[in-house]
Amino acid sequence: MILRRLFFVFNIIAVLMLLVQGGYFQIGQAASPVILEGTFNILWGDGTAGSGQTRTSYFLSTTQHDAIQLVFSEDSLTSMSGPMSLNQKAVIVQGTWLVAGTFLQVQSIALDHGVSASPQAVIGSQSWVSIMCKFADVAGEPRNLAYFQGMYSANYPGLDHFWRENSYAIVNLEGSGAFGWYSLPHVRAYYLPGGNLDWWTAAADCTAAANSSVDFTPYVGINLMFNADLDCCAWGGTWYACLDGICKNWRTTWEPPWGYENTGVIAHETGHGFGLPHSSGDYGAVYDNQWDVMSDFWSNIYRGGYDLTYGTLGQHIISYHKDILGWIDPAQMFIAEVGTISNITLERIASPQTTNYLGARVLIDGSPAHFFTVEARRFAGYDSWLPGEAVIIHEVVLGRAEPAHVVDVDGNGNTGDEGAMWRPGETFISSANGIEVKVDSATPTGFVVTIRNHYTQMTAVEITGAEQGNIVDSIPFTATVSPSNATVPITYTWEATDLPPVIQIGDMVDHVEFTWDEIGTKAITVTASNAGGMVVGNHLIEIENTLPIVTLSGPSRSNVGDVNVFTATVFPVDVPQPITYTWQASGQLPVTHTSGLIDTINYVWEDPGTQVITVTAKNVHASTADTISLPVRMPPDNVQVSGPEIGNVQDSYTFTATINPITTTVPITYVWTIDEQLNITHTAGVSDTLTYNWDYPGLHQVSVSASNLAGSVDDTWSITVYIKVLLPISLRN
Ligand SMILES: [Zn+2]
């Protein structure tokens, strides 16, 4: 304890300066590195009205120690993506003790494994208790118990009422209470060693003084109300303490009289207790954003934000702060991505009357850590004393101590004038970021805005490509959007005569290839569309027939040994040449010719049968083929008739006609002629028979003519027919 108080005597600011300058500060034994796990807590110190004083202190709470103050430069905090990413989170800290158990010089600090960097939502019942404590050397009781109890009222302008309205009834302060006054064991100066508030001792002594009559277990937050000024500031944040058996990080504030005499201060400090940082203007000051109770609430007094009992009142927290506390439904937070144009209606963030958007985030170059917020502020509830009714824009950089800075383009240091208020007809332009926010109009309770995020309207799309093409060719076309910085991605929908549409997503230029099967004039249309509109381009192409259409002609029939001439003819006459003819035929070797529109080939077959002839005609574009078949027949070489040479009248005799060769093409027609008078016709294979009898004796002729489609042969046979002599029986045998 003595070491800690001694440390206070050396002003903390001086310590920080020593550290920043690379100096070394140590009290007690030699430093040795330690690694500690615990919860990172921030306390914000806010000076009185107009002082502009601001302090920020960082602590690690562990189960082994009370809150340990962490000492490091703002530079090193920024390099760790900012203190807000650590606030109220489990962290691992490596450092060396400046005062064992109390002050740690930080070497490194990181979120504990598995802990999200996003702030924690604050929802549901948030019961606070006010403990009023009197310094041993200060007798006054600036306000009575009823005042402190009434400060939590559910009616205007009580804190329960204030936070319900701010959170859309997601949180309430029901069950909050106040106790006191209690006397502290020490004089005021004891709690202000070196002029700085000793949070440990002030909190421990004040809660200890009340502990016998206060059950702390129902509360999440403690407002410590002192009866005289503290150091520069009123303080708020989270603080580790064990009270009534509960060891945890309590939402905690330390308040001087000028704090609790203005509930705007208590609203601000309880906001820190909820984990909120400050917002600000862009002027290097912390308390200059007139649009946020987490910055400048003091100016509300000049615009009606004042209560005769409870003093200066707060206004609403900005949409970014509502968002990180989980008070805005994600469906009501519009995200304006890069490359988009959006027209949305914003509802006022105080007492919204519609379900329209309660804010928009315009992501700068797509970053989730750097963006503008856009919100509607109108006179309603605790926003009734705003500087005006307008769209308000903040630039949020997550890594910095005050992530949200209100955009104030006139640079005059006053965030409550027209430089920060965007009214219907006005447009906020951030050229460097390609972002525009135009206020189109006002609604009864909000504003209609058009947000462009790196959005550039397309003015035209042009198709380039051939104006004449060949059938079956793959023909390329290119669509080019202008201007060349139009917003991407662009969806290209290609449509062409006779073809199905093609849809592609690309950037400024898109390519496609089309192939047609039929000649004619083809129209091509491309529709290029992006987030904000569409343009259409057209093109015509004449498709001609470049296909060599081949027709094969030749004899309709042929005989073995014949020379057959086949002719291939290609149309149309203007088809690109040369043309390669590939001939294939049954029993023949393939042959390839290169020539013009006509080609011929001779084939001779030595065997009969149906021959198949195919020719393929090919040019540089394509090929076609034609096929015909040709029956090749074998003619008969000769026919021979055989039979008996003698016979009797009225006896039957059989004659046989035999064709040579046996491969002669069938069927064969046999015309038998008897004695040059009688014709009998048969159709048969390579042989035939005729049975006949004569009534008269003599020399008789049997002729045959055998023919097929390929030829005809004949032959004649002679037979001598006798009268049958009837011999006596005895001569028989
Ligand atoms: Zn503050």
Image (tube, grey):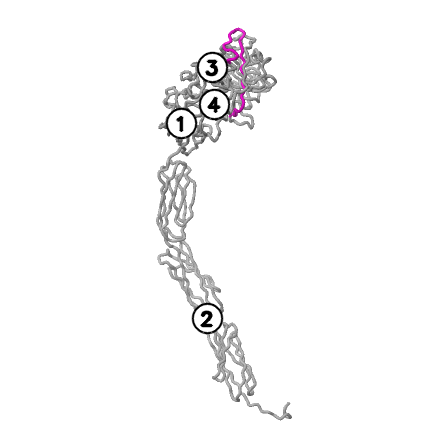
Q: Quadrant of residue 451?
A: top left
Q: Tell me if label 1 and label 3 are in contact, CB under 8 Å.
A: no
Judged from the image, the secondary structure of the residue bearing numbered disc 2 is strand
Visible in this render: residue 590?
A: yes
Q: Is mark 2 within 8 Å of ligand 1?
A: no
Visible in this render: residue 104?
A: no
Residue 468: give x, y in percent of width and height: 35, 50
- The first of marks 2 and 3 along the sequence is 3
Residue drawn at (37%, 56%), measured in percent from left and top? Answer: 575
Mark 2, residue position: 559
Quarter of the figure with the N terminus: top right
1 or 3: mark nearer the eye: 1
Mark 1, residue position: 444
- The first of marks 4 and 3 along the sequence is 4
Residue type at mark 2 is Asn
Residue 247: give x, y in percent of width and height: 59, 19
Q: What range of the chain is rendered magenta?
A: 119-147
2 or 4: mark nearer the eye: 4
Mark 4, residue position: 166
Mark 3, residue position: 310
Q: Tell me if label 1 and label 4 are in contact, CB under 8 Å.
A: no
Judged from the image, the secondary structure of the residue bearing numbered disc 3 is loop
- The first of marks 1 and 3 along the sequence is 3
Residue 725: give x, y in percent of width and height: 58, 91
Judged from the image, the secondary structure of the residue bearing numbered disc 4 is helix
- The span from disc 1 to disc 2 (Cα, nearest Å) is 102 Å
> Does residue 374 lie above or below 531 as drawn?
above
Judged from the image, the secondary structure of the residue bearing numbered disc 1 is loop
2 or 3: mark nearer the eye: 3
Quarter of the figure with the C terminus: bottom right
